[in-house]
Amino acid sequence: MTTLISHTSIDCRNAYELSEWWKELLGYADVPGDPNLPGHEECMLVDPAGSGSPVLFIEVPESKSVKNRIHFDLRPRERTRDDEVAWLLTKGATQLADHRGIHGPGSGWVTLADPEGNEFCILRSEAERVASE
């Protein structure tokens, strides 16, 4: 018998604020009929297209203190990798590492952190990946 990943949970200090930040990044929405509101200790986001996994933000008392053991690798839907990174930096993301070109021109990714320090990577868009083949 196998199991299914129901959703991904992210520990945070402010579930509502962080879910709002990720909502814009992912193009996700609140669960229909169950809006996230300031003060909620748990905030769930879902992909309106139904193809992505839900993400649950849960408030915890402790701050992030070490590197994540698991993180998102994100592929932009509408922008290039570099345009997505530039946009995210204007939205409060922090660049942690730049691995662009690591396997030759046009390859690689950029590691960023959200406003609470959770790491994630921005990969090349699908169009960029296909164009390099």
Image (cartoon, helix red, strand yellow):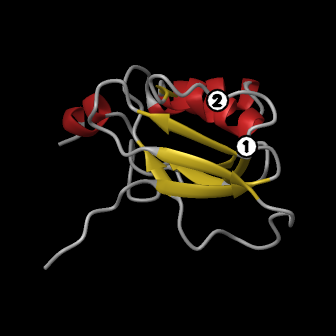
Residue 23 visible in the current orientation: yes
Quarter location, residue 21:
top right
Report the residue that reaches farthest toward the bottom.
Answer: 1
Report the residue that reaches farthest toward the front.
Answer: 33
Quarter location, residue 2:
bottom left
Q: Residue at x 39, y 20 (%)?
A: 78
Q: Vertically, is 6 above or below 69? A: above
Q: Vertically, is 67 above or below 125? A: below
The residue identified by callout 2 is: 36
Q: Quarter of the image for the C terminus: give it.
A: top left
Q: Amino acid at mark 2?
A: Asn
The residue identified by callout 1 is: 15
Q: Residues within 10 Å of mark 1 (few under 14, many from 20)?
A: many
Q: Position of residue 50 (x, y in %)?
A: 28, 32
Q: Residue at x 43, y 26 (%)?
A: 80
Marks 2 and 1, the one that precedes in the sequence: 1
Mark 2 residue element? loop
* Front of the two marks 2 and 1: 2
Q: Amino acid at mark 1?
A: Ala
Callout 2 touching callout 1 (CB < 8 Å): yes
Q: Quarter of the image for the N terminus: give it.
A: bottom left
Q: Vertically, is 48 above or below 12? A: above
Q: Residue at x 78, y 42 (%)?
A: 115
The span from disc 2 to disc 1 (Cα, nearest Å) is 9 Å
